[in-house]
Image (cartoon, rainbow, N blue to C red):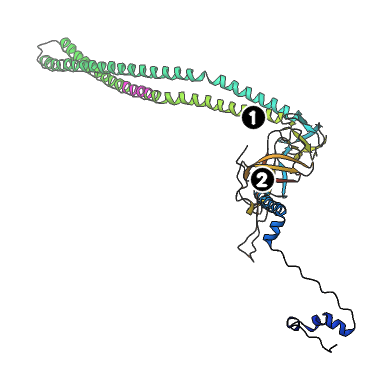
Amino acid sequence: MPDTAEVPPKEAEKSPDQQQRQPGAGAQTGQPAPQRAEKKPKKSWGRRIREHPIGFIALLVVLIAAGIGAYFLMQYFGSYEDTDDAQIDGNIYAITSRIAGTVTAVYVEDNQRVKKGDVLVDLDPKDYQVAVEQAKATLNESQTLIRAAQPNVPITSVTTQTTVSTASADVASARASLAVAQRDYESVIAQVRQAEADNAKAQADLIRYRQLVSKDEISKQQFDQADAAAKAAAAVVDARKASAEAAARTIDEASARLQAAQTRALEAERTRPNQIAIQHAQVASREATAEKDKALLDQSLLNLSYTKIVAPVDGIIGRKSAEPGQQIAAGQQLMVDVPLGDIWVTANFKETQLKRMRPGQPATIHVDAFDRDYEGYVEDLAGASGAKFSLLPPENATGNYVKVVQRIPVRIRFREGEDADHRLRPGMSVEPKVWLNKGPQQ
């Protein structure tokens, strides 16, 4: 046997390790040479398909079904937006006292259901009853003053009209008196002129009689008669002049009375509307006082009604702090009333989830407490992000800015009748799911 076996060309290209695993190499080392496995030719896809057509069709169906399922699965995941940052919200009515007083009775306990109008707390009403009686008395007094003042308006109107008429009559009388005085003065003047003429004649006769008596052509007796007649005529002139002066003064007095009457008439005419207006103003003032007293009575009655504190809505009482004998102040909170008929979900969605969200879109609300789904719809979106509503909103213009995805509160309203048994409570955690591909439904 030759020392070395002839190596085929293809085997010469193999590595020493591969040559050691050849049969000749094993013989040289004294180990048994392994059997050489015969290589099977690889089958092409076409041959396999021809040999197993049913398997290929099944595989093809599976792939198509997987593709369709993946498509619908992607469509499903893109058809809604959900979040676990959500809870049930509702109005919480604070029950407070509108007046100060002493609690005399409390009719409810925590977690008790109440109806709208149910009496919750009684306050001592005695002080407010006294205030009502005082207000009633004051109002009665004001109304009595109004009834007393109202007749003064027509009385004043008649009185002032009478005053105007009297003043007008006084003016007419004064004019008449002035006219009489003027006629009397003219008559007296005429008498003065007559007396002066008579005096002039008597004085002329006296002069003639003095010449005749000096010649003894007439008797002394005739001269004395002429002298007496002359003196009497002079006296008559003086008397008539005095009468004329008196008549002139009478004219002045009549003129003054006429002016005074005219002044009184003018004053009465001018002051008449003002006097009537004053009476109207007094009545209006007393009516205003009565209205004020009526308002005080209404306020007193309201304060008396506030001694009974009632439930504003149907709900459940909580956080009760009122106890009998407690002195409370106006505005002090005594308890809260939580209405269960008006609740909604506040869901804080990321701003990137709101692109296709619109009011009216249907929603499914999963309540963790009952592991149950409720139906609802998107009512509206908040006006700002939750961060903007916080006590200390972020100020991005200062410091280092880091972009953070914001959350926008979205209100989701339960559909009518979903919570007919009123089991849901504000504050419960929920997981809402808003369906984006469905149109608005309410």
Q: Quadrant of the C terminus?
A: top right
Magenta part of the chain: 254-265
Amino acid type of the residue tagged 1 in the rendering: Leu
Q: Mark 1 points at which residue?
A: 296
Q: Which of marks 1 and 2 is in front?
A: 2
Q: Which of 406 and 183 is in front in this view?
A: 406
- Which secondary structure lies at badge 2? strand
Q: Is residue 331 visible?
A: no
Q: Position of residue 140 (x, y in %)?
A: 63, 22
Q: Nearer the viewer, residue 26 or 303?
A: 26
- Which secondary structure lies at badge 1? helix
Within the image, what quadrant is residue 89 found in? top right
How busy is the neighbourhood of tag 1: few (under 14 within 10 Å), some, or many (20 plus)?
some
Q: Where is residue 65 in the image (x, y as percent from the top left)?
A: 68, 50
Q: Main secondary structure of the magenta part?
A: helix
Amino acid type of the residue tagged 2 in the rendering: Val
Q: Reply yes or no: does residue 261 show up in magenta.
A: yes
Picture layout, residue 184 above or below residue 2: above
Q: Position of residue 134 (x, y in %)?
A: 68, 26
Q: Name the residue under label 2.
A: 434
Query: Could you tell me how far apart the alpha carbons at marks 1 and 2 are, in whole angstroms?
Result: 55 Å
Picture layout, residue 123 above or below residue 175: below
